[in-house]
Image (cartoon, rainbow, N blue to C red):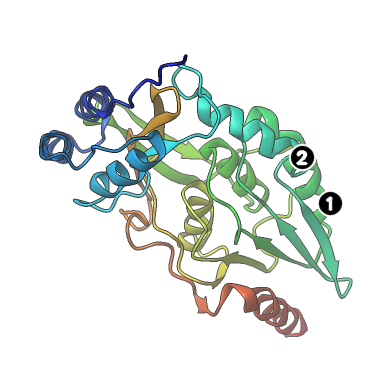
């Protein structure tokens, strides 16, 4: 005879509330959210029988005050390691191995316009430098470039800077990151030198976005837009500008908590909540055709 263990939400809520108050980039909101979670627990709102149901309920409450889409309780079907960030790393590695290192497509249209798709994310630079460099070097020979971020869900800010470095001529300030408590501030710059050939900062550049484009992919589009380097074509993006860390709070649950906020040196703000707004609005499905036509017109002119 076997005895099943009843799912207990209270330890998950207690640990998630503790992590919020210790690490969330907005301390006042963290206190409000921690109180909300404890209140909802006392009311019986989290009396559910499995981790996945709890994840949905808690995520809705975590995002109810300021709509921070990086703030969540993530459910993982496979048991997640206890080490901080390990759950996300395992999933990333599987995606990396099945997407040619995050560059699933390089295509040339009309012998002039290169299409470079970066998906499903911008992987850690120590993994992605080689495939990104190979693809960007190949695309550097095109007369115009379309960067497709429609299916990109985020990733590594260092990889964002690496891609930007291939698309600019000079070392450029891209972003300033303010970490928890504003005790540590880091600037991100493009690199003065890149491996392989550089596409450069003068040839036509278009970036495709969708309402799924998120996080680091949004930063890539936003950086290039604010610098006046690229034309954004497609849909407004999801609007997540706060980098996050992950903590295992249950064998199948990870607390995803933003620990920093981005400040663009041109706009003085970021895309949190608003998303990156396209210069040429259209449906994501039509954006490649629109950008291709724009590129050909610009080249002809």
The Cα–Cα distance between marks 2 and 1, rounded to whole angstroms, is: 11 Å
Label ID, residue 138: 1
The residue lying at 60 percent from left, 38 percent from top is 191
Judged from the image, the secondary structure of the residue bearing numbered disc 1 is: helix
Instruction: Reply above or below: 172 against 223.
Output: above
Query: Crowding near pointer 2: few (<14 within 10 Å), some, many (20+)?
Result: some
Asked whether residue 124 appears in the rendered view, the answer is: no
Residue furthest to the right in view is 111
Instruction: Reply above or below: 290 against 113.
Output: below
Asked whether residue 94 appears in the rendered view, the answer is: yes
Query: Crowding near pointer 1: few (<14 within 10 Å), some, many (20+)?
Result: some
Instruction: Reply above or below: 239 against 156.
Output: below
Label ID, residue 146: none
The residue lying at 65 percent from left, 53 percent from top is 167
Between disc 2 and disc 1, the foreground one is 2
Judged from the image, the secondary structure of the residue bearing numbered disc 2 is: helix
The residue lying at 60 percent from left, 62 percent from top is 150
The residue lying toward the viewer, choosing from 21 and 182, is 21
Q: Does residue 206 appear left or right of residue 246 in this picture?
A: right
**Split into 4 quadrants, where in the image is the C terminus?**
bottom right
What residue is pinned by disc 2? 131
Q: Position of residue 214 (x, y in %)?
A: 48, 53
């Amino acid at each position: 005879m076997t005895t099943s263990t009843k799912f207990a939400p209270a330890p998950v809520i207690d640990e998630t509330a503790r992590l919020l108050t210790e690490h969330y980039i907005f301390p006042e909101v963290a206190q409000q959210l921690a109180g909300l979670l404890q209140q909802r627990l006392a009311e019986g709102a989290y009396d559910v029988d499995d981790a996945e149901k709890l994840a949905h309920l808690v995520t809705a409450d975590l995002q109810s005050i300021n709509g921070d889409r990086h703030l969540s309780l993530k459910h993982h079907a496979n048991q997640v390691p206890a080490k901080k960030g390990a759950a996300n790393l395992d999933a990333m590695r599987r995606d990396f191995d099945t997407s040619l290192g995050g560059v699933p497509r390089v295509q040339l249209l009309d012998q002039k316009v290169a299409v470079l798709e970066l998906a499903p994310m911008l992987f850690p630079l120590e993994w992605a430098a080689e495939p990104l460099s190979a693809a960007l070097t190949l695309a550097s020979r095109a007369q115009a470039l379309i960067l497709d971020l429609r299916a990109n869900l985020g990733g590594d800010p260092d990889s964002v800077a690496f891609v930007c470095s291939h698309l600019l001529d000079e070392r450029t300030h891209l972003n300033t990151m303010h970490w928890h408590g504003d005790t540590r501030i880091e600037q991100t710059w493009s690199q003065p030198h890149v491996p392989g050939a550089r596409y450069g900062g003068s040839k036509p550049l278009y970036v495709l976005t969708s309402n799924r484009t998120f996080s680091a992919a949004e930063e890539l589009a936003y950086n290039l837009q604010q610098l006046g380097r690229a034309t954004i074509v497609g849909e407004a993006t999801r609007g997540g500008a706060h980098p996050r860390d992950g903590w295992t709070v249950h064998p199948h649950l990870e607390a995803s908590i933003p620990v920093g906020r981005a400040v663009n040196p041109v706009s003085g703000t970021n895309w949190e909540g608003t998303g990156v707004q396209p210069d040429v609005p259209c449906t994501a499905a039509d954006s490649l055709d629109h950008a291709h036509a724009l590129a050909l017109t610009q080249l002809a002119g």
